[in-house]
Amino acid sequence: MSAVEHTVSDAMAGKCVLVVEDDYVLAREVCNDLKNHGVNVLGPAPTVHYASLIIGRRRLDGAILDIKLFGQEVYELVDVLMARGVPIIFATAYQQDRIDARYRSVDTLHKPLDLGHLRRKVAAFRPQQPAAPITAPEPDSAPGPVRARDSIEDRWARLMFDAMRDGA
């Protein structure tokens, strides 16, 4: 490991980072890479709803978000995270002009991801000033068994999360 890589790893160690990605293979790769560099990873969360359940009231040092998850955009979650002062990186295939104009200032890495570049961005996470009061209520329940009212995306998310937790 080079001196620069060692410095990056040291700066990442102990950070709590949320990963929101619906591509299982990419999510696993990103989460494992971050864990191997000492990051406490929350996720991967394949849906906005599941990400909200995972974070609850936890303190986050940053978040890595794909913009589109099973057809749903993550901007509502971005608003919540920005209101909490959480630094965000978009990890997306979207070009800049396809990102909602309100969020074009968010740091963006384009797929396919360069994990070295992602690690440097995570190492640079610093608390931000909260952007605005939180408008969405925080969930007060942890993920539980499948319920009839769960959408197919939420069921899929729960299965993916369990598989990642058990197989990682």
Image: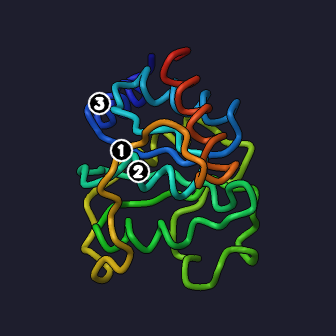
Q: Write the residue at 25% across / 49% down.
A: 58
- How dense is the environment of label 1, judged by Cα within 10 Å: few (below 14), some, or many (20 and up)? few
- Amino acid residing under circle 1: Ala
Q: Which residue is mark 2?
A: 53
Q: Earlier in the sequence, mark 3 or mark 2?
A: 3
Q: Write the residue at 55% across / 39% down.
A: 146
Q: Point out residue 111 in the picture as x, y percentages from the top left corner.
A: 73, 48
What coloring was used for the rendering?
Answer: rainbow
Q: Which residue is mark 3?
A: 13
Q: Quick one: SS at disc 3? A: loop
Question: Of 166 and 15, which appears nearest the observer?
Answer: 166
Q: Point out residue 73 in the picture as x, y percentages from the top left corner.
A: 65, 67
Between marks 3 and 2 in the image, the one whose residue lies nearer the viewer: 2
Give me the C-alpha separation between circle 2 and circle 1. 6 Å
Image quarter hosting the N terminus: top left
- Amino acid residing under circle 3: Ala
Q: Point out residue 49 in the picture as x, y percentages from the top left corner.
A: 51, 57
User: Are the residues flagged by discs 2 and 1 in contact, CB closer than 8 Å?
Assistant: yes
Where residue 109 sits, quadrant-wise, is bottom right
Where residue 6 sits, quadrant-wise, is top left
- How dense is the environment of label 3, judged by Cα within 10 Å: few (below 14), some, or many (20 and up)? some
From the viewer's perspective, tell me whether residue 168 is left or right of residue 25: left
Q: Which residue is mark 1?
A: 142
Q: Point out residue 3 in the picture as x, y percentages from the top left corner.
A: 37, 24
